[in-house]
DNA sequence: ACTTAATATGTAAACGTTTCCATTGGGAGA
DNA sequence: TCTCCCAATGGAAACGTTTACATATTAAGT
């Protein structure tokens, strides 16, 4: 019985190149992965020629076995489809590509089970590094990475609990809440509501803290503050908007653009037009923010810089595991729109 | 001189597990990758125990060397950030995950050079399969995949030239253009413009063909048709909108949602309100489409089904390379909004 | 007790690379 | 002519798995 040519998936191997070029596999390997090694130019050329002819591409998996890098980085986010993350991903991928890495993008969908599954798979692939936005800011799965010596950077969500040191890149949630609120306060508003996400994570708390702080600076104690939190959906946005007493409230901070959609649609339906009836500042800059008229005033997070910073932090960590962890927290800026109007007393209507 | 413990990246190997469990590596391997093989339950348990204790995770790269699958699929799109693709990706990833694959998402950014680079890197990784939306519908790089026996499925962009057979999943561009136009025609409009992308790819041509066909069916010859094409950007959208003679035109088909943004912003600025002054149907359903008021009437492509179909087609192809290629073309549906008004003569204004 | 057949485990050769080290063939210096 | 050395190449072990095959153990049949 003829022995089948086994040829795993029919791939061309270094051996084939060696045979074709009439040399040893060692030589071929030197040509492709050891620039320094001196070889007769003529020989080097011959090998390259042969390789090109039969279409040889080095097997990265085999190569990684011998201690070479794997060539794969991973980004695990909790909300794929959220433009904030998408934009950062684009930057990360771009920098990674320059360094010769392929990036695998994963979505935990804010689910710890999924996240764990994903990380286990990534570890099985022996990825070279990982950028992780942990679901619910939980450190559970981060420990997996640590245990397996995968260099990693935490993105956007700082960890709860007393987690050991780790590199972090995110934006200043407190400041974003503060900035949004301050903008409304400076326009003269006092009855300002904060509508946001009800997740038990630092990001949310800090934004609310920023709101509270700004309010207090203007002499508005807790009793005069109004914070509504609900899940991340249009319906939740609607629910919150319904609860608002728009006769009393003159301005709102939209703490998350996902539920913001529901709020604004509700406003539009009910004729609560901005900025005449209510002033609005939103945290986040989804694509639709620039399409609405009047245009929304938004707090912009520097996604581009953040993505770059995350990628660089990871690369730094990979190159030198001893390196001090980095922590970079970015400030947000106000993206001026037309949804904030100066507050007018309107003749003692209350 | 003490020889350093080499321990590539410090990973725990099958050998460590064997030592810990006091058995051979063969046994450990059987435990983890050969369900059938009978082992004394007590032994199996002991191995699992040992593995768990020292945190063993199988090295997928090494495993793949022996002919096992690599566990990686790739999706290469030309426009990352375009929600149309993002939504399909979500589905693909979800199905792939069920089958135990990790998916790497790549963005060629409509650049053939990039695309080639990406594919070469993916081939080096010996991915198990690939879903590709080829930049500019060019088949150049697709051949790379074929040459390296990577099972693949072409997504959304059919190939130009006389390409050999390949599996394809996309939507019916002709029908989408036809449906959009027909909707306006049925509302009584006659002066209808088509604004779209000027790329030399079948997708674009077919949409325009759909427009033309619909127009002709209503007795409107080429001279009464109006097709404007430009690049994919808001500015381009503005440019096209400026060129429109809105005194003559009573309705527009927005052929691509990216430039559509520019068009609509321009309309808003110039007070060309819809549907009173101009009726609008857009091909595509970006997030912002549901935020505008009046809400846009859109042609919806079934992204979810398409993503699933693509993933399934790929898996089918991977499991049986002999299998006949599949070609699935999905129809679009109208997503009713309020941007189309019945055409009224308005008293011989012209 | 002795073969036979099952059952349970281990040995070792691959997979495609990388790289240490050995080997070869000159040419220069003596 | 003979060393010696250097430059250029190849042999072979290793990386962490899988798996065909060999071995060792046990039970059953004579």
Image (spheres, coloured by chain):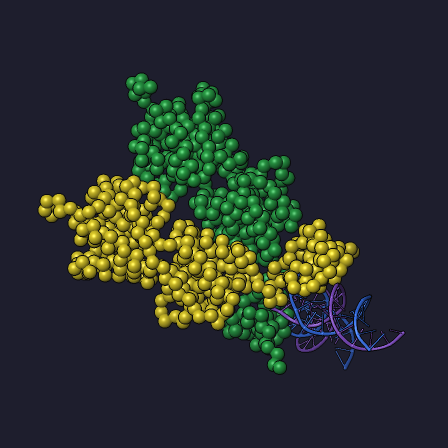
Chain colours: A yellow, B green, C blue, D purple
Compared with B213, A252 (above or below) is below
Residue closest to the far top: B348
Residue A1 location in percent, x, y? 78, 56
Q: Residue at x 26, y 58 (%)?
A: A178
Q: Nearer the viewer, residue A200 or B21?
A: A200
Left or right for A167, reference A278: right
- Count of numbered labels shown in the rendering: 0
Quadrant for the N terminus of chain B, please.
Answer: bottom right
Q: Residue at x 40, y 39 (%)?
A: B234
Compared with B115, A219 (above or below) is below
Residue B136 location in percent, x, y? 54, 40
Residue A209 location in percent, x, y? 26, 61
Residue B320, visible in the rendered structure = no
- Which quadrant of the view contains residue B257? top left
Left or right for A117, reference B250: right
- Which quadrant of the view contains residue D5? bottom right
Residue B249, visible in the rendered structure = yes
Residue A49 location in percent, x, y? 71, 52
Compared with A244, A268 (above or below) is above
Residue closest to the far left: A348
Q: Nearer the viewer, residue A150 or B14?
A: A150
Quadrant for the C terminus of chain B, please.
Answer: top left
Q: Nearer the viewer, residue A33 or A173?
A: A33
Q: Residue at x 30, y 43 (%)?
A: A295
Left or right for B53, reference A269: right
Q: Residue at x 16, y 59 (%)?
A: A219
């Amino acid at each position: 019985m003829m022995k089948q040519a086994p040829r795993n998936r029919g791939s061309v191997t270094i051996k084939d190149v060696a045979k074709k070029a009439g040399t040893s596999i060692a030589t071929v390997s030197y040509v492709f992965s050891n620039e320094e090694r001196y070889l007769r130019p003529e020989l080097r050329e011959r090998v390259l020629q042969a390789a090109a002819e039969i279409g040889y591409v080095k097997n990265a998996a085999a190569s990684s076995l011998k201690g070479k890098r794997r060539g794969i980085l991973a980004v695990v986010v909790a909300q794929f489809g959220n433009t904030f993350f998408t934009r950062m991903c684009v930057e990360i991928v771009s920098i990674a590509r320059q360094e010769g890495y392929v990036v695998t993008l994963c979505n935990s969908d804010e689910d710890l089970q999924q996240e764990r599954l994903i990380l286990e798979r990534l570890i099985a692939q022996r990825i070279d590094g990982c950028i992780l936005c942990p679901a619910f800011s939980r450190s559970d799965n981060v420990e997996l990475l640590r245990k397996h010596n995968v260099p990693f950077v935490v993105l956007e969500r700082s960890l709860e609990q007393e987690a050991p040191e780790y590199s972090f890149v995110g934006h200043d949630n407190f400041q974003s809440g503060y900035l949004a609120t301050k903008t409304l306060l400076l326009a003269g508003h006092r009855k300002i509501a904060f509508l946001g996400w009800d997740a038990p994570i630092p990001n949310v708390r800090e934004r609310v803290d920023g709101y509270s702080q700004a309010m207090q600076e203007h002499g508005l104690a807790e009793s005069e503050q109004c914070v509504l939190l609900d899940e991340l959906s249009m319906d939740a946005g609607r629910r919150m908007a319904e609860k608002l007493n728009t006769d009393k409230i003159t301005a709102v901070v939209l703490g998350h653009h996902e539920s913001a959609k529901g709020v604004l649609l509700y406003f539009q339906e009910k004729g609560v037009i901005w900025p005449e009836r209510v002033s609005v500042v939103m945290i986040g800059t989804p694509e639709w923010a620039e399409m609405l008229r009047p245009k929304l005033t938004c707090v912009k997070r520097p996604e581009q810089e953040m993505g770059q910073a995350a990628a660089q932090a990871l690369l730094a960590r990979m190159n030198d595991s001893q390196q001090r962890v980095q922590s970079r927290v970015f400030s947000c800026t106000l993206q001026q729109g037309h949804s904030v109007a100066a507050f007018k007393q309107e003749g003692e209507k209350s």
